[in-house]
Amino acid sequence: MPEQIQSIISNLRGFGVKRLAMLAGIAVLVMGVIGIASVYLNRPAYDTLYVGLDRADVNQIGLVLGEAGIGFDVGADGTSVLVPAGTTAQARMLLAEKGLPTSANAGYELFDNVGSLGLTSFMQQITRVRALEGEIARTIQSISGIKAARVHIVMSERANFRRDEQQPSASVVIRYAGIDAEKSAMSIRHLVAAAVPGLSADKVTVLDSSGNLLAAGDDPSNTSAARTLGVEQTVEAQIGDNIRRALTAYLGPDNFRASVKAEVNTDTRQTEETIFDPNSRVERSVQSVRANENNNQKQASTPASVEQNLPETQATATDGPQSSSQNDRREEITNYEINSKKIATVSNGYSVTKMSIAVVVNQQRLMTILGKDATPEQIAKRVADIQKMVTSATGLDEKRGDVIDVSAVEFIDGLDGEAIPQAGMLDSIGQHAGTLINAGAFIVVVFLVAFFGLRPMASALTAKATPALSGPSFDDVQRSLPTPEATAAADNAAVAALPGSRPGPTPLDDLRQKIRPAPQDRLARMVDLNEERTAQILRKWAAQEVAV
């Protein structure tokens, strides 16, 4: 057997049974603490499988997952089920085959348990509404940040003695965490409106679990002011992108700044136009009229004359005046159909009424391009070229009243823009925060156990394993210590060896006699230097005195 092993065994035997039992208990306790901490802190991460479940659903899901060999855990509230990360899809597929969960938010599976016999139309309608509410609630809960949702839908009804049809409406109550509730409420309104026939978004009311109203009535995003503002921002952003694409290749991304202000008109316009085409006429009807008329007139009366007034004179009968007329009329009427086209145009777009553009260019960049000896005239000419380039890229129209201004100025260093923080590391830390905390806690536990458990035990083993050193006797120590006489003799011999010295006590000898410490002081100095060695020497002396 090697000498080291024999030494360890002999040292362990020297401890005794009681000390060995204590060391074994400490070792078992340390290993147990480390094992429990490693198992507890390195548990697999869990993902939420379902939330808002009933107690019966939780029990049934636990039984199914246990039979399938999938680990699971129940939340502190007792209404959520968690499974190890990576097994969420498998667990949901398994539960879907078993028809779980069957909570109050049931969807179209309600029709699986509905019999066809004895089912009235009213019951069918109620079941359909319940199924629709459950499906919409499930979809809302799938949105990130929505913990629970409940949907109530009032469908439209047509009555015989009602003139106006009742419009459908809906109300939604959500419980959320860590999201912008107002934006989510607007999205939920459009989701519900699109899922229910005939329902408009302004008929959907959204509240939170605390009773706060999140969205109701008309959608503020559809107002004319909001629409105009959105169109203006879109137009300005598009024109700004056109300017950047035109100048970046020439000046660089950090050597110019562009600002665009656009005024747009989003009024709805309706135009009706009728166009006649005379070249494409067609005869529709022809009407012809022909008339012939002959007229003859003759008067039989005698015309008045002088002879009729003479006495005894018989007037000669003569014929009266005669007249005749002939009229021939012909009339033809042709009706033509002229080709016409009616155009009705309704425009919901926009038109830019005025645009103002301001561009500032880094003068140092122009100096670099033109050279150090560039004159102000050359810089002004280059600025004019840039202005023409911007005018062409943005579609500027001076007749419309558009304004553009391009200037060359010196940029201030350090104000080119705020640096965008890189959130990649923070995102990674946030994703693995739980794992890092578990690892850190495990390391701290191991360090504490090793420091307060293994270190004292190792010190005890080291102390006991050190063999007892046989200390010198009291006589040896006394003989090893220099005496005043010997010291004085040595000093005298050294002085005598010097040339020109004379024997006899000197003042230096007296000073050394006074400075020389006593044996008790020397013993105290030994204790300060090595306590263990001094203690062993004292034990040796005591053992010798007892033996004597």
Image (cartoon, rainbow, N blue to C red):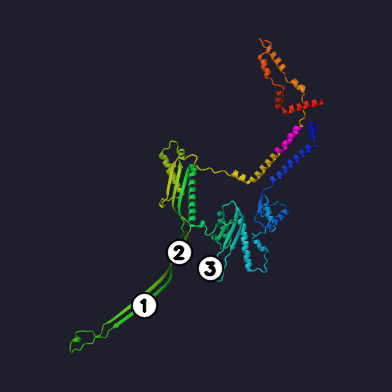
- In the image, 524: left or right of 308? right
Per the image, label 1 sits on a secondary structure element best described as strand
User: On the rendered image, what quadrant is the C terminus found in?
Assistant: top right
Counting the numbered discs, the total is 3
Q: Magenta span covers which residues? A: 451-464
Nearer to us of marks 3 and 1 is 3
- In the image, 132: left or right of 392? right
Give residue 229's position: percent from left, percent from top.
48, 53
Dot 2 alpha-carbon crowd within 10 angstroms: few under 14, some 14 to 19, many 20 or more: few
Q: Height in image: 89 above or below 313? A: above
Residue assigned mark 3: 164
Q: Are marks 1 and 2 in contact (CB under 8 Å)?
A: no
Give residue 542's position: percent from left, percent from top.
78, 27
Q: Amino acid at mark 1?
A: Ala
Q: Quadrant of residue 278?
A: bottom left
Q: Is residue 432 in sight in this rendering?
A: no
Residue assigned mark 1: 291
Q: Is residue 469 magenta?
A: no
Residue displayed at 45% across by 64% down = 341
Judge by depth and name the residue closer to the eye, 541 or 163.
Answer: 541
Residue assigned mark 2: 342
Per the image, label 2 sits on a secondary structure element best described as strand
Q: Amino acid at mark 3?
A: Asp
| Cα gap from disc 2 to disc 3, whole angstroms | 35 Å
Q: Are marks 2 and 3 in contact (CB under 8 Å)?
A: no
